[in-house]
Amino acid sequence: MYRRRLVLVIMAFLLFIPALNGSGAERQVGLTEAINMALKDYHEMRAMKNSVFAQKEEVEVARSFLLPRLSFEERALRTNNPTMVFSSKLNEGRFSAEDLNINSLNNPGPTSDFQTLVTFEQPIFQKKAFVGLDMAQKEYAALQEDYLRKSEATAVTVAQTYLQVRTAKEVLAVTRKAVEDAREHLRIADLRFNNGLGLYSDALRGRTRVTEAEQKVVSANKHFVLAKRSLGLLLGLEDPVDILEEAPDFAIQDLAYYTAASQSRRDLKALKIRWENAKNGIKLADSGYFPTLSVGGAYQLNDAQQPFGSSGESWQVMATLRWDLFDGANRESKRKKAYYQAAETAEQLNGLKRFISFKITEAYLAVDEAGKNADLSRSAVRTAEEGRRLVIARFENSLAPLVDLLDVQLSLDQARANLVLRENEFRLAVIRLSFEGGTIIQDLNLER
């Protein structure tokens, strides 16, 4: 009986191992891979792509107003209206001399008519339709630029979240190292107390510091898990995503490089296109002053007995010229409105150019500031490590109290955590500079 149970337990364990391996494996990605995944699978990017596709179909809607229209109708009629009875019999080809009788004309009996009608119409000149097509095409082009700018913004968001994961991961490592250091300090305090060289209060303080360090590990681990979930969300995944160990490095160009590149920023291009479209709005209003010309025709079958019958047959070809001579000053008001909208867009364009110049200068200075702060943080870590080494030596030789060791260890822990933050702030500042210059896709060697 015992052997049978043992075999069942071993079999269940062997079956359970693959499930553990499959579910416990956490995906790791590099920064470039993460951004490319987000550009394809992030819900906001997919929504934006659908918006672009919708505008592309709007171009075809505008084009349809220039293409021929063909329609088919089948009508059924039962009436004793004198005029309609007269015309129906004519169309059906069964009008007779008796139908010219005055009494029959004034008081005809009810009659039926099935009419089959095929019509077509082809616009020849419709300036409004031509302008509308051009405006739809320009808006499609502007929306494509918006999509590319959205891609750049998504790249920044992913990079920021990626660095947040890295920060949380390294802070977690720092807090774990602090626990190790605190336990070492406690070991020394216990050893001194057991040898009659130290105070029991020092041992108690050491245990308190170990507990505090362990609490920080718990909090740091929570932030690390949430950061990974946030990265997974950006990549269109429900599971947390970890990062690769290597720290991404970014090249920095001079200010002139970003200033020149900013003239081709995607949002600036989009606004330029919309400014052209705003001027097209004036042309659209002006098109109301032009006539419209179209040609068309119809082929008609009539029958008194059955649908789609053909006892009567006729056709017609026509041309239509329409010119609105007065519409209550509607066109004049639309033209003024379009003029003001074009002027509004022009001011927005000028404002955006100046704002871009300011943001590039701000981002460039932020990179310089972040770089210097990172250097200072590295120096602070070296100083704190040397100070800790000296205090440990003094404490071990009974030349310094435990409180000095705890204080210097706290300073070292803070310096290490601050270095992690400063280094990642520098990397993020470089990415934001590339974003403001409109070069982030090229600088990160991302897929288009």
Image (tube, rainbow, N blue to C red):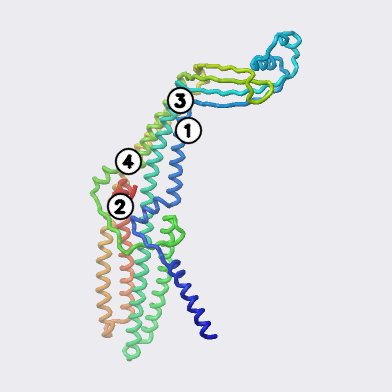
In three-dimensional space, the C-alpha distance between marks 4 and 1, rounded to whole angstroms, equals 37 Å
Secondary structure of residue under mark 2: loop
Residue at screen point 48% across, 78% down: 10
Quarter of the figure with residue 305:
top right
Residue indicated by mark 3? 128
Residue at screen point 39% across, 62% down: 27
Q: Which of pointers 1 and 2 lies earlier in the amino acid sequence?
A: 1
The spot of residue 94 in percent (x, y) is: 68, 14
Q: Which of pointers 2 and 3 lies earlier in the amino acid sequence?
A: 3
Q: Is residue 84 visible?
A: yes
User: Can you say whether 394 is above or below 112 in the image?
Assistant: below
For label 2, count other residues whose C-alpha is less than 10 Å away and answer few (under 14), some (14-19) or many (20+).
some
The spot of residue 370 in percent (x, y) is: 29, 57
- Amino acid on which the number 3 mark rests in the picture: Lys
Residue indicated by mark 2? 444
Residue indicated by mark 1? 61
Residue indicated by mark 4? 354
Quarter of the figure with residue 342:
top left
The spot of residue 41 in percent (x, y) is: 42, 52
In three-dimensional space, the C-alpha distance between marks 4 and 3, rounded to whole angstroms, equals 35 Å
In three-dimensional space, the C-alpha distance between marks 1 and 2, rounded to whole angstroms, equals 38 Å
In three-dimensional space, the C-alpha distance between marks 2 and 3, rounded to whole angstroms, equals 45 Å
Q: Are marks 3 and 1 in contact (CB under 8 Å)?
A: no
Secondary structure of residue under mark 1: helix
As drawn, the label of residue 173 is: none
Q: Nearer the viewer, residue 342 or 266?
A: 266
Q: Which of pointers 4 and 3 lies earlier in the amino acid sequence?
A: 3
